[in-house]
Amino acid sequence: TLQLILCFMVTGAFDWLANGDIFSPGIMLVVMLVGCLAVVMFNVIQAAININELLEKDSQASQWNSAEVAGLLQSIERRVAMLDDKQQILGVTMTATYRNGWVATFVAA
């Protein structure tokens, strides 16, 4: 999605250089496509954040159980922690901070 956004932005820049009009049909199409892809990317990031929050809540839920089974729960938690991979996009773990930074960068551009 990020690569498509970049490609569309480069295409829009070439269209602007060719036509010299900021409201040419090509640029308007690029603006619409980039807007749609930005919404898609935001939803993907938000879904990854929601999954990561659920994983964190699952690991914290074992702390509320009785002390009698604490050893067993810790061993299960260690095994689950090895299997639970955080959601990543381009190798970056998705957090609310990352999403907010992405939105701020997109708005600033």
Image (tube, helix red, strand yellow):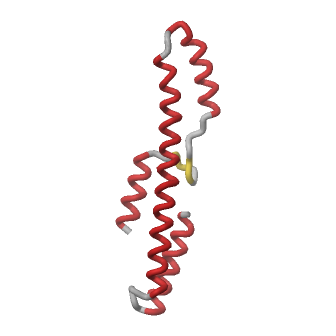
Residue at 54% from the left image edge and 12% from the top image edge:
70
| Residue 106 point in image, percent of width and height | 40, 64
Is residue 38 positioned above or below 67 on the image?
below
| Residue 36 point in image, percent of width and height | 48, 67
Would you identify the image quadrant in which residue 3 lies?
bottom right
Residue at 50% from the left image edge and 59% from the top image edge:
41
Residue at 51% from the left image edge and 40% from the top image edge:
52
| Residue 27 point in image, percent of width and height | 45, 82
Q: Pick the quarter of the image with the N terminus.
A: bottom right
Image position of 48 (left or right of 82): left
| Residue 103 point in image, percent of width and height | 40, 58
Is residue 98 positioned above or below 68 on the image?
below
Residue furthest to the top: 68
Q: Pick the quarter of the image with the C terminus.
A: bottom left
Image position of 78 (left or right of 53): right
Residue furthest to the bottom: 19
